[in-house]
Amino acid sequence: MLNGTNAVLLQTILYLANTNTPNDTKWNYPSTEIESNTLYKVNGEEGDERCYDGLGCYSSSYPWTDVSRPVSNFPQSPEKVAPNYCLFTRNNPLQCQHLSYSVPSTIYKSNLIPTQRVYFIAHGFLEGGDRPWIRRLTAELLRRYDANVVVVDWGSGSEPPYTQAVANIRLVGTITALLIKAMSDEVGLKSEFCHMIGHSLGAHLAGYVGYNLKTNFGLTLGRITGLDPAEPHFSKTDPVVRLDPSDAIFVDIIHSDTTPFIQGGLGMEEPIGHLDFYPNGGADQPGCNEGVMKYINQEKGSFFKGLRTFLGCDHVRSHEYFIESVNTQCNFLAVECESWEKFLAGDCFECASDKENGTICAHFGLTSVQSVHTSILQNWEKTDRSLVRLYTITGADWPYCRSLYRVTVEISNSTASLEHNGEIGEFDIQIRGSAGKTDSILLYKEQYYKPGSTHRQVVAGPNVGPVTSVILRWTHHTTLNFLSWRFQRALLHVKSVRIDSLDHKQTIYLCPKDEVFASSRPVQLQECSSLPSTS
C-alpha cells in the first residue's frame, strides 16, 4: 500500500525509472510503422466521437464518461500509440519476430505454431514491452510449453497523463483483436487458443481485445488473466468499460493492491472475473513494508528502480505470483470464501470443485482454469456463481507459494482446567511432517482461553508432507490473572490440536502426554491414540 503522498509521486518516479537506454533490453525490437489512418470528424466537428479508418469509432459519452470517470479522452492516433507485437517461441526465445495484422507475411512467415496456445502479455501504465517481468514470464511460459508468446508493447501510448493512457488501451485492444483475426485467417489459429495476460491497465486492455473479437468478428477469446487490474477510471463502471467475465471463456483475476486509491492503492477491489483471487486478503502483501533500502539493494543500488519497486510493491506482486505459478511444484491452492476474515477463521476449508455447486478450491495462477467445473463456465450467466472470491496466503519472498493448514486448538474442560479458570496468553506452533517442518507460526491474538473453548485459524507454511506431529507453545506475559483476580503460576490446560492439511486432504488429531502447559515451554503433540471426545 502507498500513502497519499507516495501515490502522487509514483507517476513521476515510474516515468523516470522506465526511461531505458538503448542497451537496457536483451530483446531486439525492430522499428515498426503503422499505416497512416485518416481521422474522420462527425458533422465537421469532433463532437463526442473520434474515428480512425479501419479501426472504428471511439465515443467519449456515457458509459465512457460518468461519475466514476468524469474525464474521458479519445485515443491518440495509431501513429502515436503504435503498438508493437513481438512473437517469441522456443525457436526464437530472445529474438523478436514482429507481427502486423496489415502485413500478412509477418504472420505466415513467422515461427508461429497455430496448433499451440498463444500467450499475449500486456503491460500497464508507464511501462514497455521490455520490462524484466515480461522477459521472465516469457521465458517461464516457453520453458513449460512449446507455445507462442506475443508481447504487446504499447509503451508509446502508456505515457502520462494517466487519463490518456486509459483512452489509448481502447485502440490497442482493437488492433490486437485485428491481429488475432489475421492470425486466424492466415494460419488457422483458433481464438480459443489465445490467452491474454495483462497487468494493471493491460488487464482492461485484454478485456477490450475479447470484446472486439466477439463484437466485430464473432470470435471468442479463450482466457484472460487480469493481474491487479487498475482501479482509477474502472472501478464501479459499466462492464463494457472494464474487464468482465463476458470478455473470454474464462477470466481469472489476481488482486494484490486493493487498498482504496485515495489511500494509495492502485488495483480494483471488486471481483470482475469468473474467479477472483485475493492473496493475503488482496492488500498489504507480506514483505512490502520492509523499507526502501531493501529494494534499492535488490536493484543493484539504483535509487529510482529501488524506489519504484518499493512504492509499487503490492501492485507488482500480482505478476510476481503469476510468474512463479507457471513452473512451480507447489500447489498454490486458494479457497472460495465470503471474506478474508472468514477464511482466516477457518470457516472455508472444504473443497468440492468437481461438483457443480461445490466450494471451489483453485490452483492460484496459470493452472486455475483446471479447477473449475466446466458446467460453471458454460452456464455462468444462468447461475448464482457471480462474484467468486478465493483467498490464499503467500510468503514474503520468492518462492511465494505456501501450503495451507487449518489449526484448531481445544482447551481442556477437565476438573483441573475448570478450577484454574483459564488464562490469558498466545500460542505459536511448528507443524512437522514426513517431508519437513515449518518455522514457528504465531496463532491467534493474545486473548483469554476459557476452559472447554476451541480456537481455529488458517496458517501457511512450506509443504511438510502428511502431518505427523506439532510443537505447541503457549506464552503468558504476566503472573496476574485479572479474570480471577488471584496470583498463581501461569498454566493452561490443552486437550488437543487438530490439523487440516489442504494439500494432502488430511485431518489429524494430536494430543499432549500431559494437558498442563506451563508458559513458554514447547510441548510436542503426537497423533492421539483415540479421537478426542467432543464433550
Image (spheres, rainbow, N blue to C red):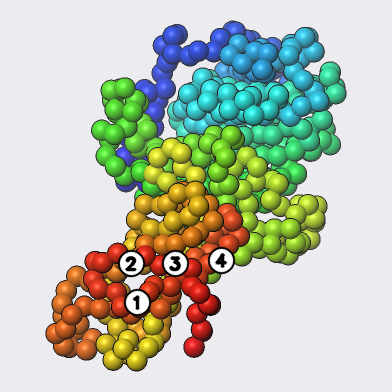
462 shown above or below 129: below
- Could you say which is closer to the camera, residue 95 or residue 485? 485
Residue 204 spot, x, y in % from top left: 60, 39
Q: Badge 4: how crowded within 10 Å, few (<14), some, or many (20+)? A: some
Question: Label 2's element?
Answer: strand
Instruction: State the residue position of label 3.
Output: 526
Along the polypeptide, which appears first: circle 4 or circle 2?
A: 4
Label annotation for residue 523 = 2
Please tell me which residue is depicted at 33% across the width and 67% down the height of the picture.
523
The image quarter containing residue 18 is top left
Can you identify the residue that label 1 sits on?
514
Question: Which residue corresponds to the image point at 37% horizontal and 88% vertical from the top-left?
Answer: 414
- Which of labels 4 and 1 is toward the front? 1
Amino acid type at image mark 3: Gln
Q: Rounded to the nearest whole Å, what is the CA distance between mark 4 and mark 2?
A: 20 Å
- Residue 252 position, x and y percent, is 63, 46
Are discs 2 and 1 less than 8 Å apart at CB?
Answer: yes
Does residue 398 appear anywhere in the picture? yes
Disc 4 residue type (three-letter): Thr
- Viewer-side residue, 246 vs 287: 287
Distance between the alpha carbons at the discs numbered 2 and 3: 10 Å
Which tag, 4 or 1, sits closer to the chain's start?
4
